[in-house]
Amino acid sequence: MKSFDKQDMIAGAVLGAFGMFVAIYAVRNYEFGTTASMGPGYFPAVLGGILAILGLIIMLLSIRHIPSAEVWQAPFGLRPLLAVLVAVLVFASLILKLGLVPATIALSLVAALAEPKFRFQKAILLGVSLSLLSWLIFKVGLKMPLSAFVF
Amino acid sequence: MDLFSTFYSNLALGMGEAVTLSNLWYCLIGVTLGCLVGVLPGLGSIITISLLLPITYHLPTSGALIMLCGVYFGADYGGGTTSILLGIPGHPAAAVDVLDGYPMTKQGRGGVALFMKTVASAWGSMVGIVLLMLFAPILSNFALQFGPAEYCALMLLGLVAASTVGQGSPVKGVAMMVVGLILGTVGTDINTGELRFNFGLMELSDGVGLIPIAMGIFALAEVIKSVSNPSDTSMQTKFRLRDQLPTREDWRRSFGPMLRGSGLGAFFGTLPGTSGGMATFLAYSVEKRISKHPEEFGKGAIEGIAAPEACNNAGVGTAFIPTLTLGIPGDAIMALILAALVIQGIQPGPQVMTSHPELFWGLIVSFWIGNIFLVILNIPLIGIWVRLLQIPYNLLFPAIILFTCIGVYSTNRNVFDLYALFVFGLMGCGMLLLRLEAVPLLLGFVLGPAFEEYLRRALLLSRGDYGVFIEQPISLAALSVAALVLASSVWSFLRRRRKLAIATLNEGSQ
């Protein structure tokens, strides 16, 4: 009875595919050169090839003769993942258009969605105090060129 | 005598650099911040140093490095505190303190454990720094004669060693290191000026930023993981300051373990990739094996605190030897400290000691000062650190995300870097999901450009003959050790896996 370690199978496949892509892309687009005088494509092409082989080895090693008792459990939830990453995107899109304070408040609001219980007032309060804190640290303290509000 | 007088004048040079009001201040900020984040679970020195990296653009060179190194030392002191008092390690290297430290707390001897931990840490740091002072100048003189082939081989040794010591499969570790090397090739090729892997984005012509990578795969992924698994860190035990003093018996029993632990730590600290717990567990098991009363281990033996802590801190000091003399970092933190050097416009390598002696010696003197600060800070402030643990994570994590974003943005005042942060945060989560390690990737990324450069130069000089790496004795030795490390880690991984499989099979048949 054979089984697969799903985690390693997917990891190997992803890494191997990425390696193959890098190798092919480098060979097609950049000059390979010779070993004595390497072109820009030599190093990435070789690395891509090595990674493709390593990916294959990881996939082969993922074949188990005995099914593992381990259950594959994601180390994080979908909700925190989305909330944290979207908070970064929101901050990125607001920092230049509206300024530090609105971007910070928006970031805190979105980030607060990561928790199972969303409390609007608490998130706003946190956002306001964080924007004050970051304004004091980064603008007043470290004199970084950030504007609190953009109109 | 000559050696002694240069040593003395170097020390004086370092004193002049480190003992200025502003550098003392940076050192104090660094160690205090380090202690703080070491105490808070889920906030380690890697995250803190990557958060602080953008700020170092605005600081003078020595101040920036003194502060970052202070964080490293401070987090090491702080990390054990929660292990001992709550049974929760602040960072992986402090996990071994849980074994005997937490039982001691339950017996009402938590204060003694903390005191001994501080003493052992200070002793270990002293050993590490003295060795750094003695060996760094010798090694860097020696390294100045290295050619590109030697560098290449040494870098490969560092990369292989660092990618194979992790918890999981060494093959996956090496693969992640290769991914890091590939990420390092993005941007302008220095030899031909051709743009590589920029996919039409001009923002990528200088390459992918280290700060978005480090923050994305460490800080953001860690935040997402911690928010998903809220842990209850309420303080159960109370202790008083006067209960902290060890008895004469405690001192007697700790003396030998501290000596042996610091020796082990100093040795392993110089090797790449061995920091982060492996050496401390080794020091612990050595003490257990040679002890006259091994049955006390795990139930509150003071030796179980003294040896790993001395080992850990001695390793922190000696880890700077390859980093500062060869420019080859042994772990992620050292890679970030090298990155801070590059930010300041200093190319890491053996020439740092001759071209910037005031920086090197100033840094060493600041290590002494930092450790003195830490001993002074730690003993009276333990109560405060413990109270800080009660800050709820739901207030802390939006602040971490915010500081990550501001840090990334302000590095180049570029919104593109924030989108890169998003991408690497996503990638970090994917890596957590597939149990791929982040440290080899970061090391590969940091060393990649230099590695390619040395490789190209070595093969240009040898007219394309790969034999050059075997002909030079130093490079042959480095490559043989690398092959040995790789083979032994693959072998032990396969054996461990087979054992696990047999165990599950037996369980299944019962």
Image (cartoon, rainbow, N blue to C red):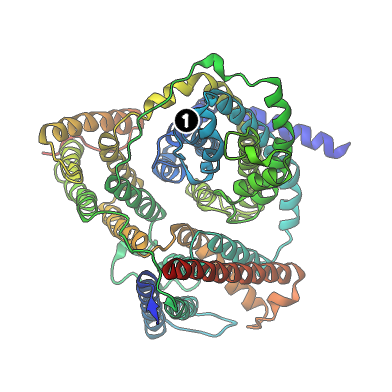
Q: In the image, B80: left or right of B51?
A: right
Q: Residues within 10 Å of mark 1 (few under 14, many from 20)?
A: many
- In which quadrant of the rendered image does the N terminus of chain B lie? top right
Query: Would you name the residue on which mark 1 appears?
Result: B85
Element on which disc 1 rests: helix
Q: Amino acid at mark 1?
A: Leu
Which quadrant holds residue B124?
top right
Q: Residue at x 16, y 45 (%)?
A: A113
Q: Residue at x 74, y 67 (%)?
A: B474
Q: Chain of mark 1?
A: B
Q: Is residue B71 shown above or below B354?
A: above
Q: Is residue B243 shown above or below B258?
A: above
Q: Residue at x 58, y 29 (%)?
A: B370
Q: In the image, B117: left or right of A97?
A: right
Residue B19: x %, y % from top left: 61, 25
Q: Nearer the viewer, residue B348 or B356?
A: B348
Residue B131: x %, y % from top left: 73, 42
Q: In the image, B346: left or right of B287?
A: left
